Image: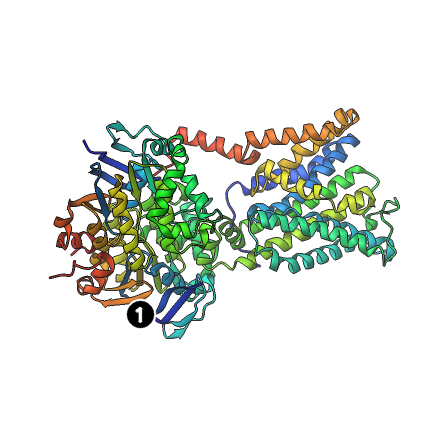
C-alpha cells in the first residue's frame, strides 16, 4: 500500500534521513522506533508531505507520489496526526472533525453527520459541542485521530500518539487502533512507548542516526544486538 | 462558490431581521440631520469594518493596509465621473475591479508572511499606493484634490437628503454583512476558521491555504473599495491624504476588535461605539487644541480593550456562557 | 544524610502527568546517572529538581533544607545548578561571556576569575576559543561550554541533562573525562544519559526510569550488563 524508496533529507551538513526504504502492506500496522535523534520524525514528515525531499520516492497504492505539500498528500489519502496536538483552538470537537471531512467535497450537513460517526468510532461520542481546547490530553489525542480519519484516508500516520497518556488511556487507544485495522486501515506509527509497540505492531522498523537498522517482527527486532546497542550501548545484548 | 450550500442555524433569521431594521429602519426612524449624518458614518464604517473583518477576523490575516482599497475605490469612481462622466454606480464597480486586481497581485508575496510581518507589509502597500498616486500627478494632469459638483441625482449617486445617504450606507452594510454571513456559514468559512487557528493542521486536512486566504482578500478588498466610493460621493471631495490614510486602515481594524473580531455583529458594534465617541470628543475637546480629543480617544480605546479583550460580542458571549454553566452542568465532560 | 533527596515526587505538564512518585537520592561526592528511554520522564525529573517546574506532590531536600519553596534562581544560589538538555548557550555572545554569565550569584561572582581559570584548565579548548561566538562552536565544545557555565556558579550539585545527545563518541569520552575531574574537584554530579553503558561507566550508581517511575536502581556494577535494564527500555 505504501512504499518508501531510499528517502533522504539533509539539513545543512546533517543527513537526518539517509536513504531509508520501507513498505507497509494494506491493513498492516508498522511501528517506527529508534533512539532520540534517529530521524523518525523527519522521515514521518517526509512521508506526510510536510517537507520536501532531497532524494527518494514515495509510492502510494502503486502510484508515485511527488512532493506536493501536506494538503495534497492528505487529499491523496495519507492522513497524519501530530505528536503535540495541533488543534483548531476556537473550534468545538465536532467542528474540528467536520472541517476535515469537507475536503472530500461533501456538503456541510453531510460532513456533520459523518463527523458524528467518526467521533463515535474514536470514543468521543457525547462531546461534540465541547470546546476542543478543554479536552484532556487523552481526548485531544483521540480528536487528532478523528480529524485525520475524517479525511477518509487509506493510510494513517500517527506521530507518537501514545505520548503523555497513562496506561489505561494507552490501552484504550490501542483498542481503537486495532478496530481501525480490522476495518482495513493501514497504519504507520512513530512511537517511543515500546510496550505499546509490542502490543499492537505487526512489524517494527528501527532507525538510528538516519538509517534503517532493522525491519521485522517486533520480538525479533527488539532482540537484535544492533538495536539494543543503539538504545543502550554495548553490553546489553540478549545472552 | 457554494453559496447555495449555506449552513443555516437557529437564530440567524432573527439576527437578519434585526440587522435590516437597523440598516433600513433607522434611516427612516431618525429625523435629526445631525444624527442622520452620524448614522451614515456608523453604517458605512460598519460595512467597511465588516469587510476588513472577513480577512482580519475570519481568516486571521491582520491587514493594516486597507486604506489602499478604500482610496482606489474613491479615486476610481471620482475620476471616471469627473473625467468621463461615468455614473459612480458603475465607477464603483471599476474601483472594485482594480482593488481586486491589486489584492491578487500582492497576495502571493504578502501571504507568505505571518503575523506582525504581514501587517507591516500591508501598511507598506497602503502607503505605496498613495505615493504612486502622488507621483503619477507629475505626468498626468490630476489636481491634488478633486471635488465633485453638488448636483443631486440618483444616477450621479449624489443626494440632497442625509437620509438617502444613510439608507445607501445601510444597504451597503447589509450587502457586506450578508456576504460575510454566507461565507462564514459555508465551507469556505470553516476553512478560514481552521487556517486562522492553525495553518499547519489546516494544510494537513487538505485545505489550500493560498486559495482561501485569497478569496477572503478579494472580497474584503472589493467591499472596502465600494465603501470608498460611497464616502467620496458623500464628502464630494477627495485628496490623497484623506482617502489614502493609515488612520482609515487602523480604524476599520480597531472597530472590529472593539466590537468583537471574527464575529458578524462585532464590526458594526465597534463602529457604533467609536464614531459617536469621536464626534462627541471632537465637539467637546476639539477647541481645547493640541489634539486633546485624540489623546482622550486613544486613552478610552485602551481602557475598553483592557476591559473587554474579546470585544463587545465576546464579553456578551462569555456572560451568557457563564450563566448557562451555572444553571446546568460542567462544560468539561 | 544525602546531598539531594527526592521523595515521592509527582509532576505534570498541564494536564499530562509525567512523574508518578519518584524516589531517589544523591550522596555528597557521588556521580549518579538517570537513564531511561525517551519520554520516560528523565528530563522532567531534572527540571522538577531544578525548580523549573513545580512538583504536584512529594518532597525535595537539598543539603538538609527543603527545596520545594525555592525558585530556580534561589536553588542556584544554594548550589543546585542545572545544565539543560541541548546546551542552551547564548549563541551571539562569546565563550568567555557565556562562562562569565554563569557566575551570576554574588558568591560565585567573587570567585569568578579563579573559577574561570579552573574551567580553562579543565577544558583547554574553551581557552583557545575564548573570544569566539558560542553559536559557532561544535556540539562537543558547546557541551563543554555549557558545563563550564554551570560550574561557574560554584555548584555543590551539578545536574547535566542528556550529556551525549548529538555528540560523536570520541567527544563523549572527552566530556566524561571532564566529569570525572569535576568529581575530583569535589562537585557532586547528577546526570541524565540516553546511552546506558556510557552513563553507568561514568557513575557510581544509577536509576532506571520508565513511564515516570523508578523501575530499577543500583550500583554501576549491579546495573552493568543487567538484562533488567534492557527490559526497562525494550520491554524484553
Where the C terminus of chain B falls, by quadrant? top left
Q: Nearer the viewer, residue C17 or B206?
A: C17
Task: Look at the picture and state if C55 lies above or below B144.
Answer: above
Please provide percent x and percent y for residue A100.
43, 55
Q: Considering depth in this image, is A21 or C35 the residue closer to the camera?
A: C35
Instruction: Please name the residue shown 73% across and 35% down the image.
Output: B28
Please tell me in which quadrant of the rendered image residue B1 appears.
bottom right
**A216 displayed left or right of B47:** left
- Residue shown at 85% from the left, 47% from the top: B145
Query: x%, y% of residue A81?
Result: 37, 55
Residue carrying label 1: A22
Mark 1 secondary-structure assignment: strand
- Neighbor class of circle 1 (other Cα within 10 Å; few <14, some 14-19, many 20+) is some
Q: Nearer the viewer, residue C79 or B228?
A: C79
Q: Is residue C144 above or below residue C4?
A: below
**Residue found 72% across the figure and 28% down from its top:** B293
In depth, the one of C151 and B314 nearer the eye is: C151
Amino acid at each position: 500500500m505504501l512504499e518508501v524508496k531510499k528517502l533522504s533529507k539533509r539539513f545543512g551538513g546533517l543527513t537526518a534521513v539517509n536513504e531509508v526504504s520501507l513498505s507497509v502492506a494494506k491493513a498492516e500496522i508498522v511501528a517506527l522506533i529508534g533512539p532520540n535523534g534517529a530521524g523518525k520524525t523527519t522521515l514521518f514528515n517526509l512521508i506526510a508531505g510536510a517537507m520536501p525531499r532531497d532524494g527518494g520516492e514515495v509510492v502510494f497504492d502503486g502510484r508515485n507520489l511527488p512532493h506536493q505539500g501536506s494538503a495534497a498528500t492528505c487529499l491523496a489519502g495519507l492522513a497524519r496526526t501530530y505528536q503535540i496536538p495541533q488543534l483548531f483552538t476556537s473550534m468545538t470537537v465536532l467542528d474540528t472533525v467536520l472541517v476535515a471531512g469537507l475536503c472530500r467535497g461533501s456538503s456541510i450537513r453531510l460532513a456533520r453527520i459523518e463527523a458524528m460517526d467518526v467521533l463515535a468510532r474514536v470514543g468521543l461520542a457525547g462531546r461534540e459541542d465541547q470546546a476542543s481546547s478543554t479536552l484532556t490530553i487523552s481526548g485531544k489525542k483521540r480528536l487528532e485521530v478523528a480529524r485525520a480519519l475524517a479525511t477518509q484516508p487509506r493510510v494513517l500516520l500517527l506521530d507518537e500518539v501514545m505520548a503523555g497518556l497513562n496506561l489505561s488511556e494507552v490501552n484504550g487507544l490501542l483498542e481503537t487502533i486495532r478496530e481501525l485495522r480490522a476495518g482495513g486501515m493501514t497504519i504507520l506509527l512513530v512511537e517511543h512507548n515500546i510496550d505499546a509497540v509490542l502490543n499492537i505492531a505487526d512489524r517494527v522498523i528501527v532507525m538510528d542516526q538516519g538509517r534503517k537498522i532493522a525491519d521485522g517482527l517486533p520480538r525479533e527486532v527488539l532482540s537484535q544486538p544492533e538495536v539494543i546497542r543503539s538504545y543502550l550501548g554495548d553490553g546489553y545484548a540478549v545472552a | 462558490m457554494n453559496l447555495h450550500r449555506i449552513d443555516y442555524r437557529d437564530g440567524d433569521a432573527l439576527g437578519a431581521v434585526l440587522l435590516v431594521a437597523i440598516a433600513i429602519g433607522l434611516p427612516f426612524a431618525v429625523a435629526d440631520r445631525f444624527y442622520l449624518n452620524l448614522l451614515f458614518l456608523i453604517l458605512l464604517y460598519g460595512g467597511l469594518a465588516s469587510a476588513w473583518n472577513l480577512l482580519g477576523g475570519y481568516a486571521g490575516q491582520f491587514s493594516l493596509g486597507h486604506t489602499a482599497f478604500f482610496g482606489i475605490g474613491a479615486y476610481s469612481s471620482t475620476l471616471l465621473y469627473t473625467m468621463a462622466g461615468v455614473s459612480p454606480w458603475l465607477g464603483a464597480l471599476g474601483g472594485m475591479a482594480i482593488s481586486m486586481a491589486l489584492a491578487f497581485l500582492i497576495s502571493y508575496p504578502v501571504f507568505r508572511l505571518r503575523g506582525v510581518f504581514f501587517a507591516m507589509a500591508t501598511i507598506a502597500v497602503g502607503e505605496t499606493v498613495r505615493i504612486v498616486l502622488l507621483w503619477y500627478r507629475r505626468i498626468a494632469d490630476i489636481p491634488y484634490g478633486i471635488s465633485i459638483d453638488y448636483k443631486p441625482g440618483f444616477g450621479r449617486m449624489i443626494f440632497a437628503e442625509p437620509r438617502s445617504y444613510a439608507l445607501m450606507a445601510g444597504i451597503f452594510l447589509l450587502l457586506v454583512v450578508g456576504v460575510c454571513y454566507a461565507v462564514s456559514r459555508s465551507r469556505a468559512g470553516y476553512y478560514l476558521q481552521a487556517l486562522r487557528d492553525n495553518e499547519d493542521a489546516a494544510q494537513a486536512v487538505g485545505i489550500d491555504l493560498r486559495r482561501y486566504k485569497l478569496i477572503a482578500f478579494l472580497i474584503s478588498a472589493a467591499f472596502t473599495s465600494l465603501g470608498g466610493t460611497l464616502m467620496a460621493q458623500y464628502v464630494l471631495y477627495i485628496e490623497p491624504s484623506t482617502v489614502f490614510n493609515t488612520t482609515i486602515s487602523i480604524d476599520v481594524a480597531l472597530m472590529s476588535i472593539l466590537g468583537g473580531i471574527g464575529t458578524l455583529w462585532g464590526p458594526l458594534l465597534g463602529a457604533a461605539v467609536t464614531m459617536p465617541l469621536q464626534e462627541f470628543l471632537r465637539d467637546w475637546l476639539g477647541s481645547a487644541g493640541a489634539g486633546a480629543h485624540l489623546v482622550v480617544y486613544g486613552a478610552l480605546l485602551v481602557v475598553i480593550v483592557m476591559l473587554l479583550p474579546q470585544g463587545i460580542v465576546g464579553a456578551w458571549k462569555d456572560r451568557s456562557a457563564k450563566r448557562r454553566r451555572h444553571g446546568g452542568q460542567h462544560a468539561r465532560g | 544524610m544525602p546531598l539531594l533527596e527526592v521523595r515521592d515526587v509527582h509532576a505534570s505538564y498541564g494536564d499530562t502527568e509525567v512523574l508518578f512518585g519518584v524516589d531517589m537520592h544523591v550522596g555528597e561526592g557521588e556521580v549518579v546517572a538517570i537513564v531511561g528511554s525517551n519520554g520516560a520522564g528523565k528530563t522532567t525529573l531534572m527540571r522538577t529538581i531544578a525548580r523549573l517546574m513545580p512538583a504536584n506532590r512529594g518532597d525535595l531536600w537539598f543539603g538538609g533544607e527543603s527545596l520545594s519553596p525555592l525558585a530556580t534562581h534561589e536553588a542556584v544560589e544554594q548550589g543546585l545548578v542545572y545544565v539543560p538538555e541541548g546546551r542552551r548557550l547564548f549563541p551571539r555572545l562569546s565563550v568567555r561571556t557565556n562562562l562569565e554569565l554563569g557566575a551570576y550569584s554574588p558568591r560565585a561572582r567573587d570567585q569568578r576569575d579563579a573559577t574561570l581559570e579552573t574551567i580553562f584548565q579543565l577544558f583547554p579548548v574553551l581557552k583557545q576559543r575564548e573570544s569566539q561566538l558560542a553559536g559557532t562552536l561544535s556540539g562537543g565544545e558547546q557541551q563543554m561550554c555549557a558545563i563550564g557555565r554551570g560550574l561557574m556558579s560554584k555548584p555543590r550539585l551539578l545536574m547535566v541533562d542528556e550529556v551525549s545527545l548529538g555528540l560523536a563518541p570520541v567527544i563523549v569520552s572527552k566530556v566524561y573525562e571532564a566529569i570525572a575531574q569535576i568529581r575530583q574537584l569535589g562537585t557532586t554530579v547528577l546526570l541524565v544519559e540516553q546511552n546506558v553503558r556510557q552513563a553507568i561507566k561514568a557513575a557510581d550508581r544509577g536509576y532506571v526510569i520508565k513511564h515516570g517511575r523508578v523501575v530499577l536502581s543500583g550500583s554501576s556494577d549491579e546495573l552493568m550488563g543487567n538484562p533488567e535494564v534492557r527490559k526497562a527500555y525494550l520491554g524484553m
